[in-house]
Amino acid sequence: MGLILDMVYLAGATASSPVWGYKLLSTGKWRTDWAGRFGRGQNLPKKAGTRTILFHAVSVGETNLIRRLVDHLAQQDPDLNLVIASTTNTGFDRSEQLYSKDHQVVRYPLDFSGAVNHFLDRVKPDLVATVELEVWPHMTSLCQQRGIPVCVINGRISDRSFPRYQKLAPVFRPSFSRLAGAAMQTQTYADRIIAMGTPALGVQVLDTMKWDTADLADEVLGVDQLASEMGIDRDRPVVVLGSTGTTEEKLLTDALLTELPIEAQVIMVPRKPERFDEVAGEFEGIVRRSANKPGETSGGQRLFLLDTLGELRQAYSLADVVIVGRSFNGWGASDPIEPIAIGKPTIIGPDHRNFREVVSAFEQQQGIEVSPDITTASKTAACLLQDKDRAATLAQAGQAVIRARLGATQRHADFLMTLLGSH
């Protein structure tokens, strides 16, 4: 199977090379750890008698998601080796920021048999936990041959991807059948992964760890510094467009400027760094975080672009109202939990399928505003700025929902330790 699949991968990569080659060159992603992508690198140190859990966190979202789980496991068993493997460049950079002081951070390999074998030789995991899904044929097969259990944590199979998996069931079923366990967010997702061949006895419903990553708080460190360095006036209202996607910044901002009071400020935070220049080019006079220096702005600016990584939480803390991005352009939405956790009245668009259960939980308790379109979202934002009582009630209801759903991290830790102890 290994050689045949390698040939299929190679043929597919060759046929699609004009597409991915152009993307790599145009976005700068060709500057990456190619040796690591082929499983190469230094062997990780491992003391005799210790055990290693390898987390596969594809990008920034998955990397942030497991932060509390990693900390919890490290406190629960200080002798555990915890290794975080990321696929994307931004995910790898974020992993280094969060984990490199106390844990090993590595590049996750391409699913060629040679690359996976080199990778497993280097890391020597006793358990592989892949975040949300990412079930790859060679990784599951070669781990099974070595007696290394592979599991899914915080698992989900979306409405969009499930039909695709079903159509290609003969291809994917062997990989799913090799899973030693799966901790899924909902019963629907659990039913789907069982339908794909994962043994039912190993599947559990543990809710999403995103509730536990919320960091309920009324104050956030670094907010004053961000405001000062970007020239944001703390006495004027702020609307933050968080983790936005293609087309949303321009459409949302144009709509907001027709609805908001003249003194209101808008902070845009695109989800993907490669779009920073594109977004900046759409607005004359926009203040960029990366280019602005303290004292440079003269006041009166309305539009700001946060074009740095790791400061979304601080931006949310500046907000009087948050509009969650990727929910108006067909991309399924970004995470609404973080702004709600710090007490911000939050609006999300009609397409929130990536967080359907989360949004439903908030909506049932009137802890979020779901807008059918950009115009309605802009009008709602203006109303929330004017009606402080309504805004406060919305924010408080959202925080109450989060408090009621805490605990999935502990359940995931128990799930992993049970799997680790049973093999």
Image: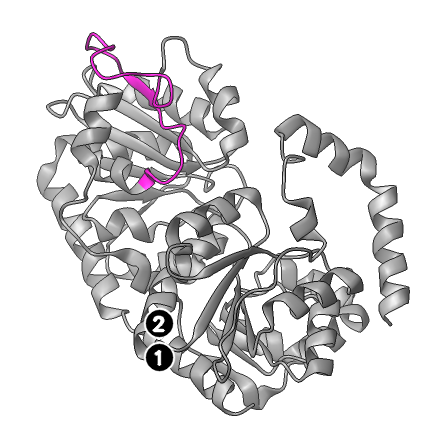
Disc marking residue 77: 1
Residue 185 visible: no
Classified by dominant secondary structure, the portion drawn in magenta counts as loop
Across and down, in percent, residue 161 comes to 64, 59
Amino acid bearing label 1: Asp
Hey, what amino acid is under mark 2?
Answer: Ala
Q: Residue under circle 2?
A: 74
- Decide which of 369, 14 is in the foreground and name it: 14
- Circle 1 packing at 10 Å, graded few (<14), some (14-19), many (20+), is few
On the image, the x and y values in percent for residue 78 come to 35, 76
- Residue at 12% x, 35% y: name it: 387
Horizontal side of 48 relative to 284 (left or right) equals right
Judged from the image, the secondary structure of the residue bearing numbered disc 2 is: helix
36, above or below 290, in the image? below
Contact between labelled residues 1 and 2, with CB atoms less than 8 Å apart: yes
Q: CA separation, marks 2 and 1?
A: 5 Å
Q: In the visual, does 190 lie left or right of 224? A: right
Q: Say if residue 419 shows up in the picture.
A: yes
Q: Which segment is the magenta one?
A: 288-312
In the image, 324: left or right of 278? left
